Amino acid sequence: MLSTQIIFAAIHSKLVEFNANFFLQIFNTFVLFSFLTWKLFKPVSKVLEDRKNKIKNQFDSAEEKVQEANALYESYKEKLDGIKSERDEIIKEAVELHHEGNLGHENTSRYNVYATFAGVSSKSILFNGHIDTMPPGELSHWRTKPHDPIIANGRLYGLGSADMKAGLLSGILAVKLFKDAGIPLPVTVKIASVADEEGGGNGSVVATMNGQKADGVIVCEPTNGELVLANMAFVFFKVTVLGSSCHSGAKWLGVNAIEKAIFLMSAIEELEHRWLLTKKHPLLPPPSQNFGVIEGGSAGSTVPDHCCFKTCVHYLPNQMNYEEVVREYTECINTRANGDSWLRENPPQIEIYQTGGGFEIDREERLPSAMSAAWKHTTGNVMPVVGSPSGCDCRLWANIANCPVIQTGPGELKDCHTPNESVSVSQFYQYIEAFAELILSW
Ligand SMILES: [Zn+2]
């Protein structure tokens, strides 16, 4: 039997054979995924000009694939239309069971695509990525067209390049490495391309609620060679406070709703201080809350009869939980309100309008250990272990599908959700190779 090194050397030699044409292969794969899920991807790779004819053939076959996908879409249209109402039901169930999912978020014509590549062993590993992006924003801030990716200075520029086409394709192309090298996959590899992450994670909510799972899940969001083993959970609250309006010249005849809201907000700040003093995590910042919106009043000369504020509470996984955070937050407001004669009679209304869990995995578990070893083997570097203050789909694979989960992928957070988004091509290659190594050792 071939040793791991020999098998990997064979795969590696295939990787070295990759040339500029490689990006067209990506394109072909991607067009199929894009077509069924999100916008069409129109590559113009200036670096490939010397191979015009070959490119043309590739583009023609890509065009054919688009037509094939189009026909497939048409034949499935009726079925796909039915999926929308099914999706809404699933998301509703996820909200009730797991406090996850963004009900009512527009998802027409956006579908998940799953692939399973059977391996010698039925042991499985799943690569997850989202193909929706944030809007490109102000186009004049882009040096290139956001939807026409180009390669320059060793980087691929384009909307969604780092967040996170490169990550998703690293998983897909790791499988292709095995196929090209003629080596059977040692384990079953699954791909879950989801169509909605940026809007609250409905794509992975539907995937996990529909039973997608594996013995290990890698969410390939950009981490720039770091290994994310934890991220924060969150709850968004909206608090509405009523007052009694009158002319500001006779303010004492009314009740100022904005001042009452500030009175309640100071209680929440005290709660935040208590959390800061008592909750600590080795990889994550302390829990916090942010007053993100405050609305109320109509004129300087009117005592406002209405004020609402919105806060986002970020809290630690495992040490804190959703029920406890909601209880503490609600008790904090109600206790302060009880000390005020007006608010006691006119209690503030507290609503929760979006939530998401956190996730955490021990670095000694098999998946993080295997990924660290694969990265060390591929790059010679240690993969630093970190926590992430921002959330992603990891929580859904951990909390709904109950899978071991890690987050790692090509690209940097600073290049996401910003004009001139880009990803390092060499790091993209590194990830393909590292994921192939992970598959080999899984
Ligand atoms: Zn992302």
Image (cartoon, rainbow, N blue to C red):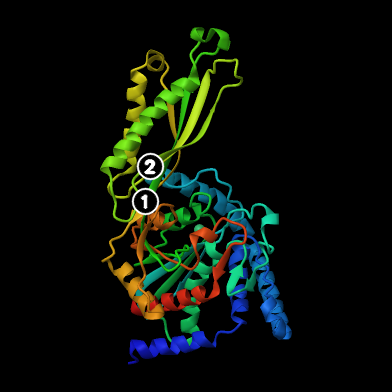
Quadrant that contains the C terminus:
bottom left
Occupied quadrant, residue 19: bottom right
277 displayed left or right of 254: left
**Which numbered disc covers residue 358?**
1
Q: Residues within 10 Å of mark 2 (few under 14, many from 20)?
A: some
Where in the figure is residue 13, as x and y percent of width and height? 48, 89
357 displayed left or right of 412: left
Which residue occupies 58% across, 65% down?
422
**Please, is residue 173 above or below residue 101 in the view?**
below
Q: Secondary structure at mark 1?
A: loop
The residue tagged 2 is: 288
Type of amino acid at the residue the image marks with label 2: Ser
* Residue 393 visible in rendering: yes
Where in the figure is residue 281, as x and y percent of width and height? 29, 51
Type of amino acid at the residue the image marks with label 1: Gly
Where in the figure is residue 253, as x and y percent of width and height? 50, 7
Occupied quadrant, residue 378: bottom left
Q: CA distance from mark 1 to mark 2?
A: 14 Å
